[in-house]
Image: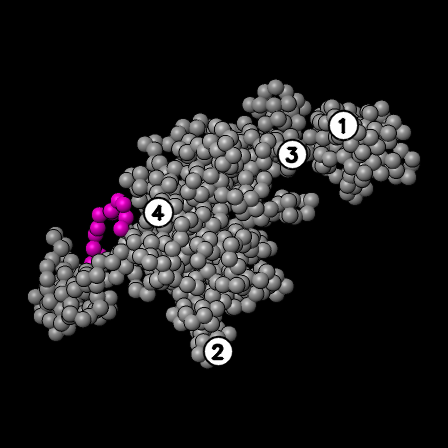
């Protein structure tokens, strides 16, 4: 069986799945690679034969224990210096069941289990924490001689990024919360159950919005996809609930293999979006969550004779996972739901947001970033609150970092393989874009849309949960144990989706050690400790330092002794400190607040002094048209006129700047449209008039000069049109 079973990159309109073996032909889990755990896991091992009770100070202790004997409870000991006591319980009794009865006894303040304290083991003892020489080499358990189930399991990525070095310093803090904004999380998964965040202000299942945050029963997170099944014609953005889980449902294949009753998060077995891949997005959020913060070095069962360690290792062992569902079972969703998820996670105290989804802005209309303003504003709000946002770069394999990873306020993560090369599917940055200069160097309308780092994203094993379609398909092929919502571990294969959570988990470790770390400091630690990949394309190149394919290199997890001193914060990298921008009123997360084509720094530096805004000497960074002459400052500057003087203007279409649009301009326009002449930047600023918006040239015309511009200039020169 080919181990590259499926590759997932969540987008809002379609799920991109470059697979080597079609999911429609055979679902990922069919065959011997499936590893299912049915035992109950606990977040911390507990004493199996005794419980703890706290007695009221006025309690007659001997009388209490006489009464307790009638319940089969015997005093075992006392916690030194306190009113806590240990009581043995009947041989076959469950500690938690006994506790419920014990709390009713006279004189008992409370009763609890007695968790066992363990030293964290480095390396962890999770059975799936394994490193193969080449994770792309397959064998089939039960078919190939000497091949066992664990022989095909590999968490090579954690070894490649030196995770154990970081774990020797910290394995993470329970006070750090990583929000997984995705397709939902199987909160009962054996390797996740103990690390799931709990809303302290909510009462589970009472049907009341206890904490007043607008979401009812969001005890473990929230679900902004709700009942949506993935059909864009019938799904509604208002569907939501307080349950981000991917639970089991009611399915009896012996009666009707195609009838399932349950939460739509686990799918419905129908290809609702028509892409030929039913229910493909179900497992995604669970896999991402486990990579970032699966329970690690954890025992799987309560029986003391077994001592069986559970599953896989996550990067941040003790970080809490906040599940926020905003992607439906088909793998898509609305931008409005994504924004709701971002605001929710921020409001509820998340420290890190993992966004393993997005889309190519170039696939939208000319408005581009205007179409995603709802997400942009939400992310910038989160960043202003000190939240670190990690986003996957995309799986197009081309020269365009996917939104929202293209935002300068996010950490953009691409994927690498075990040979320290860029994964062929991993989207990379524009060639001419320069990091952190606050300028749109390549002219694509996006500022500093670069890669930060690559992380392992091929042949990735993680926690898994099965969809309705997978269960149905498995049943047809004779697999009777796979049920919708069933826990498992799988080779989820490849995608930048699975590289991003490694960075999110690493950020969790850094925040565990340095709770007040800023985005700039976290970014610098990641970039400066990355392994520089000199030949990320395997073509014999020598790319020293930052390059468009690997960013600042492949992730290496280092916990520094101290954070870097970056001086005044400059969140948008435009050269102005956040403090100065707040004084002026510009947006510290947007290098061009008024969108006029001049950065905030350029506007304040118009008079040669960027330390303050001087009225009359600087162009206005809060107004796109400082002199109110109808032409925005950036175009005036490019055309060579003064954006502070309304009298210093030009005529649209007047390429040669003669003061009128005439036959000379038509001749220049003709030659430019034919490619015979290359116009200067000033000539382009005056002559690039298409398209017209409300009878006027667009406020930010494109850089290309074509026949549309020629026709408009000709129409104006001949008097047919005036603009």
Q: Earlier in the sequence, mark 2 or mark 4?
A: 4
Say left or right for 303 vs 436: left
In front of the other: label 4 or label 3?
Answer: 4
Residue 424 vs residue 304, the one in the foreground: 424
Q: CA distance from mark 3 to mark 1?
A: 16 Å
Residue 339 drawn at (x, y percent): 54, 51
Name the side, left or right, on which 620 lies relative to 578: right
- Give the structural element (helix, strand or loop) at label 1: loop
Q: Which residue is mark 4?
A: 132
Pointer 3: what residue? Answer: 443
* Residue 663 visible in the picture: yes
> What residue does disc 2 label?
256
User: Which range is magenta?
Assistant: 113-125
Mark 1, residue position: 679
User: Can residue 508 be seen at all in this image of the molecule?
Assistant: no
**CA separation, marks 2 and 3?**
57 Å
């Amino acid at each position: 069986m080919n181990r590259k079973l499926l590759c997932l990159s969540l987008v809002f309109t379609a799920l991109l799945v470059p697979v080597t073996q079609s999911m429609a032909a055979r679902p990922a889990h069919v065959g011997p690679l499936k590893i299912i755990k049915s035992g109950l896991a606990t977040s911390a091992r507990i004493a199996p034969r005794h419980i703890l009770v706290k007695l009221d100070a006025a309690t007659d202790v001997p009388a209490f224990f006489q009464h307790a004997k009638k319940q089969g409870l015997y005093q075992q000991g006392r916690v030194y210096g306190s009113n806590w006591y240990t009581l043995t319980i009947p041989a076959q009794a469950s500690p938690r069941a006994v506790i419920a009865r014990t709390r009713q006894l006279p004189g008992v303040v409370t009763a609890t289990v007695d968790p066992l304290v363990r030293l964290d083991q480095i390396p962890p003892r999770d059975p799936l924490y394994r490193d193969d020489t080449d994770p792309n080499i397959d064998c089939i358990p039960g078919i190939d001689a000497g091949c066992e189930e664990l022989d095909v399991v590999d968490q090579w990525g954690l070894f490649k990024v030196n995770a154990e070095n970081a774990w020797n310093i910290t394995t993470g803090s329970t006070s750090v919360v990583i929000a997984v904004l995705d397709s939902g999380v199987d909160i009962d998964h054996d390797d996740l159950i103990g690390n799931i965040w709990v809303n302290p202000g909510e009462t589970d299942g009472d049907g009341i919005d206890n904490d007043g945050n607008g979401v009812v029963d969001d005890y473990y997170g929230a679900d902004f996809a709700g009942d949506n099944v993935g059909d864009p014609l019938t799904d509604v953005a208002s569907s939501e609930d307080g349950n981000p889980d991917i639970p089991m449902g009611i399915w009896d294949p012996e009666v009707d293999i195609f009838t399932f009753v349950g939460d739509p998060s686990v799918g419905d077995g129908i290809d609702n979006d028509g892409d030929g891949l039913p229910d493909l997005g179900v497992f995604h959020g669970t896999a991402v969550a486990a990579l970032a913060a699966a329970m690690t070095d954890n025992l799987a069962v309560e029986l003391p004779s077994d001592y069986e360690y559970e599953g896989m290792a996550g990067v941040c062992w003790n970080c809490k996972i906040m599940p926020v569902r905003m992607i439906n079972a088909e793998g898509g969703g609305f931008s409005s739901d994504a924004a709701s998820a971002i605001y929710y996670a921020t409001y509820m105290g998340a420290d890190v947001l993992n966004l393993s989804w997005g889309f190519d802005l170039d696939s939208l209309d000319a408005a581009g970033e205007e179409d995603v303003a709802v997400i942009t504003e939400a992310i910038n709000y989160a960043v202003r609150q000190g939240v670190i946002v990690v986003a996957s770069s995309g799986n197009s394999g081309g020269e365009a970092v996917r939104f929202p990873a293209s935002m300068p306020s996010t950490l953009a993560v691409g994927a690498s393989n075990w040979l320290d090369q860029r994964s062929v599917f991993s989207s990379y940055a524009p060639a001419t874009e320069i990091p952190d200069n606050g300028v749109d160097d390549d002219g694509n309308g996006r500022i500093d849309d670069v890669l930060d780092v690559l992380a392992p994203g091929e042949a990735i094993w993680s926690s898994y949960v099965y969809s309705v379609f997978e269960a149905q398909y498995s049943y047809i092929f004779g697999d009777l144990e796979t049920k919708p919502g069933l826990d498992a571990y799988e080779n989820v294969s490849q995608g930048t989706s699975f590289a991003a959570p490694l960075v999110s988990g690493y950020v969790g470790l850094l925040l565990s050690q340095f709770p007040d770390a800023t985005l700039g400091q976290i970014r610098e630690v990641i970039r400066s400790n990355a392994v520089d990949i000199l030949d990320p394309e395997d073509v014999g190149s020598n790319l020293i330092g930052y390059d468009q394919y690997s960013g600042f290199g492949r992730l290496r997890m280092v916990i520094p002794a101290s954070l870097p001193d970056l001086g005044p914060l400059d969140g948008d990298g435009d050269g102005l400190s956040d403090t100065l921008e707040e004084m002026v009123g510009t947006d510290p997360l947007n290098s061009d607040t008024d969108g006029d084509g001049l950065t905030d720094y350029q506007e304040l530096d118009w008079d040669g002094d960027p330390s303050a805004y001087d009225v009359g000497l600087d162009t206005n960074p809060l107004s796109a048209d400082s002199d109110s002459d109808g032409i925005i400052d950036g175009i005036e500057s490019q055309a060579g006129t003064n954006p502070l003087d309304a009298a210093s203007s030009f005529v649209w279409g007047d390429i040669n700047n003669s003061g009128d649009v005439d036959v000379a301009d038509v001749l220049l326009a003709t030659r430019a449209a034919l490619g015979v002449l290359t116009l200067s930047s000033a000539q382009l600023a005056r002559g690039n008039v298409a398209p017209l918006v409300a009878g006027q040239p667009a406020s930010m015309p494109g850089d290309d000069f074509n026949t549309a511009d020629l026709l408009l200039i000709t129409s104006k020169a001949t008097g047919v049109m005036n603009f």
